[in-house]
Image (cartoon, helix red, strand yellow):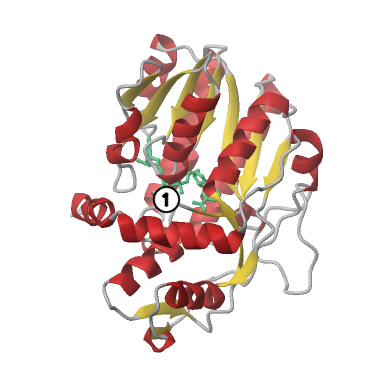
Amino acid sequence: MRVLITGGCGFIGSNFIRMALSQRPSWDIVNLDALTYAGNPANLADVEAHPRYRFLHGDLRDASLVTRVIETHPPELVIHFAAESHVDRSIAGPLPFMQTNVMGTAHLLDALHRQRQGRLVHISTDEVYGPLALDAEAVTEEAPLKPSSPYAASKAAADLQVLAYARTYGLQAMILRGSNNYGPFQYPEKLIPLMTVKAMQGQELPLYGDGLQRRDWLHVDDFCRGILAATDHGRWGATYNLGGGNERSNLEIVTRILRTMNRSEESIRLVADRPGHDRRYAIDSTLAKKELGWTPQRNFEQGLEDTIRWYLDHKQWWKSAFTQEG
Ligand code: NAD
């Protein structure tokens, strides 16, 4: 099967491509990636010469390039990971998020629709639902979208476009909303790699506000397994929440990182909160469990320890990621 993956050089996309090449022997994968600061070809160095893998350097913001790619590599399945993905960056400068996450997705949808090509699995996030009260039930796929950050708003806009193309034009599409992923190859700007790298360098660990914001952590291998399960068993037209069932406060995460690394908790420094910082996300994954036969496998404490170990063992990787950004 001809599979087009967008954003495959980033954190989740690269883990997914590695898993798909080993578990889906019939897939021929084309990876279209613009190689932004977050896209690193080194993430896929071990598979770059794989006979069923091909890399295309290209930007989804370029509508004619997207059309050309769909024409020359007509996909049977598209898995759309490419996005600007960091909330802090979206607050500092929202426009690149609108250009890639909203318009980039629009270009992809338009090219697929006009050329009547491929089914689309759109990778989205729990952040589109907005904040949840501490005592509220986890949200299902039916909950309204109330995004807080420019990042979440741009992802919600992408989701709505996908639903509109499915409804209006009959595009076969599915939306997967994952909770906070962690694991190897995550750019060291996100909480777990950032704090691990800072602790390694003996720096202070800045934590927003009171550090009690809660997130639901999902190992990237479990998310990738869920995406594969969706391509096998998912209903076209459906949206699925994929959550890890591991709600933790940011303070708990950072404390655990420091303990694992035998560092003092005194290096935690509470700093001014992020504007519009959501207190809690929690999604109900019952539908995915029922229809996809998916449940997360990784134990969180062990997964976190393995992840910390990976960053300790791959200093060169994260140092070169920073250098590449300049
Ligand atoms: P990432 O920032 O690590 O990687 C994004 C990739 O997209 C990079 O390789 C980048 O070069 C590429 N890209 C960016 N703009 C592009 C453009 N205009 N054209 C082509 N390629 C472009 O992101 P990630 O953490 O791997 O997230 C992947 C997807 O999963 C995103 O859609 C994100 O919203 C979603 N998601 C992430 C998480 C998480 O915790 N990281 C959780 C749920 C959903």
Viewer-proximal residue among 126 and 200: 200
Label 1: how many residues lie within 10 Å, few (<14), some (14-19) or many (20+)? Answer: many
In the rendered view, tell whether residue 85 sits above or below residue 214: above
In the rendered view, tell whether residue 63 sits above or below residue 70: below
In the rendered view, tell whether residue 209 sits above or below residue 141: below
Determine whether the beta carbon of the residue marked 1 sits less than 8 angstroms from the nearest atom of ligand 1.
no
State the SS at label 1.
loop
Viewer-proximal residue among 17 and 259: 259
Ligand 1, what quadrant? Answer: top left
* Left or right of 234 in this view: 324: left
Could one spot residue 195 in this view of the protein?
A: yes
Look at the image and tell me in which quarter the C terminus lies: bottom left
The kind of residue tagged 1 is Pro
Which percent across, then down, holds residue 314? 30, 54
Residue visible at 52% across and 23% down in the picture: 110
Residue visible at 50% across and 82% down in the picture: 209
Residue 271 lies in quadrant: bottom left
* Left or right of 326 in this view: 192: right
Look at the image and tell me in which quarter the N terminus lies: top right
Viewer-proximal residue among 156 and 21: 21
Residue 171 lies in quadrant: top right
Could one spot residue 160 in this view of the protein?
A: no
Viewer-proximal residue among 261 and 209: 261
Which percent across, then down, holds residue 66? 40, 23
Which percent across, then down, holds residue 183? 47, 52
Residue carrying label 1: 184
* Left or right of 68 in this view: 28: right
Figure label count: 1
Q: Residue furthest bottom?
A: 266
Residue visible at 40% across and 73% down in the picture: 261
Which percent across, then down, holds residue 39? 33, 42
